[in-house]
Structure formats: structure tokens, C-alpha cells
Image (cartoon, helix red, strand yellow):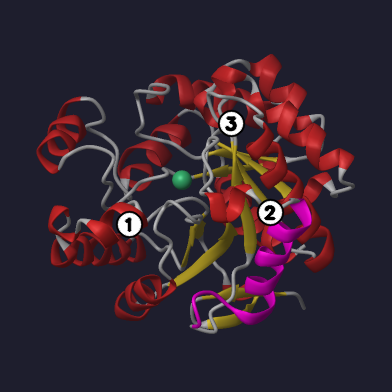
Amino acid sequence: MPTVETVGGPIDVEELGRTLIHEHFRTTDEGVRHQFPHLYDEDGEWEAALADAKAVKGHGIRTVVEPSALFLHRDASFSKRVADEAAIQIVLATGIYTYDHLPQALANRDEDALAAIFVHEIEEGIQDTGIKPAFIKCAADEPGITPNVERIHRAAARASNQTGKPIMAHSRPASGTGPEQMRIFAEEGVDPSRVQIAHTGDSDDLDYIERLLETGCWIGMDRYGLDIFLPTDNRNRTLLALLERGYADRMFISQDYCSTIDWFPLEVQDYLKANEVPDWSMTFLFESVIPTLKERGMTDDQLDQMMVENPKRWLGG
Ligand SMILES: [Zn+2]
């Protein structure tokens, strides 16, 4: 029976249970917070993370996959505290989240050197905690496949090939990055069924999505509530059309919610959450999206496929 690494150690895939495939209990910039800690409210961050973890547990979630990486302030000790306190399982990644920029310490290392960093974490653990990542994260966004982005994708691919760990690639459908990312993985010989192209649900272009699915990857319909990228009704219509075309066994649903996010000053963040993305939360799926999808024809089997079976297959291989 395949196992999956969690912050509490390896578990049998069958123990994953109902899983949110893409949520963040804290998203901040580790460099900024290390240098300017007065900008951050540690106690508030902890309370927000714990409240969200307890809330999703209340909706029957046993596992949250937290695809944080370098530049998203991945912190294995923090995630473990959240998991322990809320009695849920959290699955972490190795990898780099950047749309282009790399510090000199990484800009001057080639694909294999970057891959070795990921492999080291997969074998030895993250940040001297002994907690091991279950997958590899990389990203492409508006700047597209820049030389740095390509190098990180090739490094992720090589680390995946060496360790058998799956890949999650942040994508930007509006820039058409998904097929380009899959092209790089194919060139590196990665089995496409080990790759998840995150944020595919930011598009309601069924041609784009089916073209991507034809490469053999998984897709993340994972930003429910982020109306700034695509409103909920468009997300629902797209998901239902894909279910009708038989893709329940290729998709994940999630919210990419961040219990804390430092991309804007705190007061601006509060304004944006209230006005631009009022529905965005770690429980929006349960409170609104899933009931609506069920009313419009999604079956319990399809929901279980997306939230229970697919996580097992993507993470467990
Ligand atoms: Zn994310």
C-alpha cells in the first residue's frame, strides 16, 4: 500500500480521507518578515490558521494539502502545530514559488543543482524538522516560461523522476501557461499522470482545458471564491460541463485560501477581502459551492472522486 508523507509522518494513502488539495494556512514573504517583523502579527496569524483548520475539520476534512514553498513562507513547524492542534493531517511540498525572480544563491545553480535541493528535502526532511514533503511545487504566471521558470520546472521534473514524487505546477490560464509547462515536463520524461496543473479553474475556456487534459495531467479547479480571477458561477458551469464530459477522475476542487496573506498592507487586505473577494474562505466550498453543484446535478460519487479518490491517486501514485 502506498504511503504519503504528512507533517505527522508517513500515512497509508487510505488514511488521507476527504482532502482539500490546495489551501494555505499562512502566506507571507519569509525575507520581508525576517527583516521587518513589526509588519506582522504572529498571534493573529496563528489564530487565523487554527480557526480555519478547525472549521474544515468540522466539514469532514481529514487532510489539507498546503502547497507552500520558497517565497510563500513554507514553515514545517508552524504547519505541524496547526495540524496537531486541530487534529487534521497536513501535506507539504518542496519547491520554489516564483514567477521569475531568483536570489543569486539560486540563480547561479543549474537544473541538477536545484533538483538536488528538492531531493535532499524529500529524503532528509524540511528545515531540520524531519518532516518530509510529499510533492514538488513550481510556478509559471504572467511573465510566462522565463529562463528561471523553465530551469525550476526542469529541476522539479528531475527531482520527480528521481524520487517518484508528484508535481504541482501553479499556472495562469490567461497566459496559456499550462500546455507549455506540460511540454517541459514531457521533454524531461515525467509521467503526466504525476503532474497537477493548479489554477486551471481560473478559465472557463473548455477548449483550453480539454487541450490541457489531453496531455494526461490532473487539473486544479482550486480557486473557488477568488472572483477576481473568475466568478463562482463561471467556475461552476465549467466544472459541471467537465463532469458531464467524464473528467471527474482528473480534477480537484479547492479554494487556494490563505488564512493570512501579506500581499497588501493589513488594512487594504481587509478591504479587499470584504469587497473584491467576499466569498473567499476555507469553508466556501462546503457552505455554498458543493450544495449548488449538487442541486445542479453533481453526484455524491463525483464529489468523492474529486475529494477522496483523486488525492489518493495523485499523491500515492
Ligand atoms: Zn496556492
Note whether 252 is above or below 79 in the view shown: above
Q: Is the C-beta of the residue carrying label 3 under 8 Å from the nearest atom of ligand 1? A: no
> The residue under label 1 is which amino acid type?
Arg
In the displayed structure, would residue 233 be above or below residue 308? above
- Side of 283 relative to 307 (left or right): left
- In the picture as drawn, the residue positioned furthest to the left comes out as 267
Which residue is under mark 2?
A: 109
The answer to whether residue 13 shows anywhere in this view is no
- Tell me the crowding category of disc 3: few under 14, some 14 to 19, or many 20 or more residues within 10 angstroms, Cα based: many
Instruction: Please tell me in which quadrant of the rendered image residue 221 appears.
Output: top right
| Number of other residues with Cα within 10 Å of mark 1, as a class: few under 14, some 14 to 19, many 20 or more | many
Q: Is residue 19 left or right of residue 213?
A: left
Residue 105 pos. (x, y %) = 56, 56
Of discs 1 and 3, which sits in the foreground?
Answer: 1
Residue kind at label 3, given as amino acid type: Thr
Indicate which disc residue 131 carries.
none
Instruction: Find the magenta span and give its range.
Output: 111-128
Query: Quarter holding the C terminus?
Result: bottom right
Instruction: From the image, state whether disc 3 or disc 2 is nearer to you.
Output: 2
- Cβ of disc 1 within 8 Å of ligand 1? no
Label 1 to label 3: alpha-carbon separation: 22 Å
Spatial distance from mark 3 to mark 2, Cα to Cα?
30 Å
Indicate which disc residue 26 carries. Answer: 1
Q: Amino acid at mark 2?
A: Arg
Pick the front one: 230 or 61? 230
In the rendered image, residue 311, in percent from the top left (x then y), is placed at 63, 57
Q: Residue at x 9, y 38 (%)?
A: 267
Residue that badge 3 annotates: 200
- Under circle 2, the secondary element is loop
Relative vertical location of residue 100 with respect to residue 135 in this rendering, above or below: above
Q: Secondary structure at mark 3?
A: helix
